[in-house]
Amino acid sequence: MEIYETKTSLTVAKPSTVRLSASDKIFYGFIDVLLVLLFFIIAIPLWSTITLSFRPNDFIGTNLEGMFLMPWKWSTAAYKALMGNDGFLMAFGNSFKIMLAGVASALFLTIPLAYALSIRSLPGRAILTVIVLVPHMFDVGMIPSFLMVKDLGLIDHLAAVYLPTAVSTYNCLIMKGFFEGIPDELKESARIDGASEFYLLLRIIIPLSKPIIMSVGLFYAVSFWNDFFHAMLYLNSNNLMPLPILLRNILMASGMNEFVEVSAFGEAPIQAIKAASVFLAAIPMVIAYPFIQKYFAKGTLLGSIKG
Amino acid sequence: MDSQTTVLKPKRNLWRDIKRHRSIYLLLLIPMAYFIIFKYIPIWKGQIAFKNFMPRKGVLGSEWVGLANFQEFFHSFYFWELLRNTIMYSVGKLLISVPLSIILAVSLYECRIKVLRKTVQTLTYLPHFLSWVIMYGILLVLLAPGDGLLNDAIKAFGGKGIDFLTNVKAFPWVVLLSDAWKEMGWGAIIFIAALMGIDPTLFEAAMVEGSSALQRVRYITLPSIRPVIIMVVLLRLGTILSGGFNQLYMLYSPSVYSVGDIIDTWVFRGLQEGKFALATAVGLFKGVMGLILVIVSNRATKRISGSSLY
C-alpha cells in the first residue's frame, strides 16, 4: 500500500514569501525559459504532424505556414478516406483484438505468479523466483523463440503476437511488490477464518489491488498496441495485419499507388493521409494516457528504468 | 528424543506449509506451463547455435559443429561494426538522455509556476507511449528531404537540404536525438521521485544561511539524488548490448547499414534470410554478454545504493 501512496507529481511548495535576490531571479527565470523551450521542442513535432493531417488538397504554402492554418480551413478528407477504408478498419480491429486478448492473458498469467512470489511462507518461493528471473536475465535471442512459435503452429495466428510476450518480468515484480505491501493482518485474519489461499487471492487481494492491476494492465495494453516486431515476425496474411504494420506500409510507400490496400484516395494529399494514419494510431494511447499518468507509482518507477 | 524432535519438527511444518498452499501450486500450473513452453524450451533450442541447423532435420537431428558458428561471427567483417554501432548507440543514448532527464527533473522541481510545471511534465512523458512506427511518421514530417519542416528551415537560411535518414553522417544523430526526444520525460520520473524525498528542512536551513538558489541546487539537490543517478547509469550499462531494436529497425535502410546496423537488427535479418544457426549464435553471444553485464551492474548497484532491482 505504501508503494502506491508515493506521488510523483510535484507538490512541494517553494517558499515564495522569501524575497528573491537578483541572482536568484535570474536562476528562476532561466528555469522558466528552459521549460518553455522544452515545451516547444516536444510540442512542435506533434503539432506539425496533427496540422499536416488536416491540410486540404489545395493548400499552397510552406510547412511553417501549414502549422498556423486556421482550424476552419482544416480538411478532414484524410480521416474520411482512412475511416472509409476496409483495410484500415480491419487493421484497427486486429490491433484491438491483439490488445484485448493480450491484456487478458497477461493478467491471467501475471496475477497468480506475482501473488505466489509475494507469499513469504510459500515453500519453494526461492526456486520460483529463479524460474521467473532466469529467462529475463538470460536472453537467447529471437530465433529459438521463433522456432518454438513455429513448432506450436501459431504462425499466422494473432496469438503468436501476444502469447510469447504475455508475461513481463518487470510488471510481475511491480505487482509482487504491491501484494507484499498489503498488511499481513488482513491475510492472517482471513486464514484464521478458514479461507483457502485461492479464496484469499480472489476475495481479498484482487479487490484491494485494483490500482496496481489497472496500471499493469495499461502498461501491457500500451506494449501490445505498439508491438510491430512480433506481428512482422509471425503474421503473413493481409487480413491479420495489425495497425503498426499497416502504418509502416503506408509511411514507407512513396506514392499511394504502391500501397495496394489503401488505393482509393484522391481527396487528400498523400502527406495528409500519412499524418492522419499516424495520429489515428496514436489516439488510443493519447486517450489512455491520463489514466496511465494517474497510476504512476513508485512500483512502476522501478520498471521504467529499463523501459 | 530431543534431537529427534528438532529434526522432525521443520519437516512436519514444511509438509503442512505445502498442504496449506496447495491451491497456490494449482494456481501456478498454467503460468509454469507457460514458462516452460515460451521461455525454457526456447533456451533449450538455443543449442542450434552449436549446430549446423537444418529446419528439415529439426533441432535434435541437426549435427553438432562446435563453435564454428561463433568463429564465423567473430572473424567476419561485420563483427566489429555491429559491436561498435550497438555500443555507440547505447552509450550515446546514456550520455544524452540521462543528463537531459536530470536537467528536466531539477527544472521541474525548481519551477515556481505551477501551470508551466504541470504542462511540461505531462507533455514530456507523452512520447514514451508512442511506438517507433508512430515516431517514424513524426520524424518523416520533420526530416523528409523534399518537404520536411527542418529542411524547409535549412533552405530558408540558404542551406542545402539533407536527407537525414539516408545520410551516413546525419543518421546516428537522428537516432540519438529522437530517442532523447521520446524518452527524456519518462527517464526524468525516477529522478523526480528521488527529488521528492529530499528533506525540505535542508532547503530552509540553507535559505536562512543566505544561500543562492544555484548553490542549493549544487550543494543539496544534486548530491541528494546522486545515488539514484549512479543506479540508473549502472542499470543502463547492464543493457549496453541492446541499442534499441525497434527504433533502428524502423529508421534504418540499406544505405545506412554501416552506421545503423546493431546486433539485434542483424540477427533479425539473419532470421529473414534463413541463417538460423549463425544468427542464433550471434543472439546467444549477446545473451551471455548481457547476462554478465546485468549481474555485474546489479552487484555494483547493490554495493553503492544498498538495494538492487532483484
Image (tube, coloured by chain):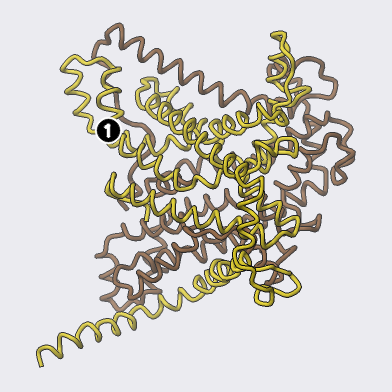
Chain colours: A brown, B yellow
Residue placed most toward the observer, B224 or B163: B163
Residue at left 72%, top 22%? B162
What is the chain identity of the residue bearing mark 1? Answer: B
Q: x, y percentage for residue A173?
A: 41, 57
State the image quarter where residue A287 is shown: top right
Instruction: Classify residue B88 as left or right of residue A176.
Output: right
For badge 1, the amino acid type reads: Ser
Residue placed most toward the observer, B8 or B256: B256
- Packing grade of label 1 (10 A; few <14, some 14-19, many >=20) is some
Q: Which residue is mark 1?
A: B224
Q: Quadrant of the C terminus of chain B?
A: bottom left
Q: x, y percentage for residue A291?
A: 50, 43
Tell me the SS state at disc 1: helix
Q: x, y percentage for residue B5?
A: 15, 89
Residue farthest to the top, as pictured: A22
Q: Quadrant of the N terminus of chain B?
A: bottom left
Residue at left 55%, top 56%? B285
Q: x, y percentage for residue B151?
A: 71, 19
Q: Examine the rendered structure and indicate whether residue B41 appears above or below residue B215.
A: below
Instruction: Classify residue A2 as left or right of residue A284.
Output: left
Residue placed most toward the observer, A22 or A289: A22
Q: Examine the rendered structure and indicate whether residue B276 appears above or below residue B173.
A: below
Instruction: Classify residue B105 as left or right of residue B244.
Output: left
Residue placed most toward the observer, B231 or A193: B231
Instruction: Classify residue B27 as left or right of residue B207.
Output: right
State the image quarter where residue A156 is shown: bottom right
Residue farthest to the bottom, as pictured: B1
Residue at left 76%, top 34%? A274
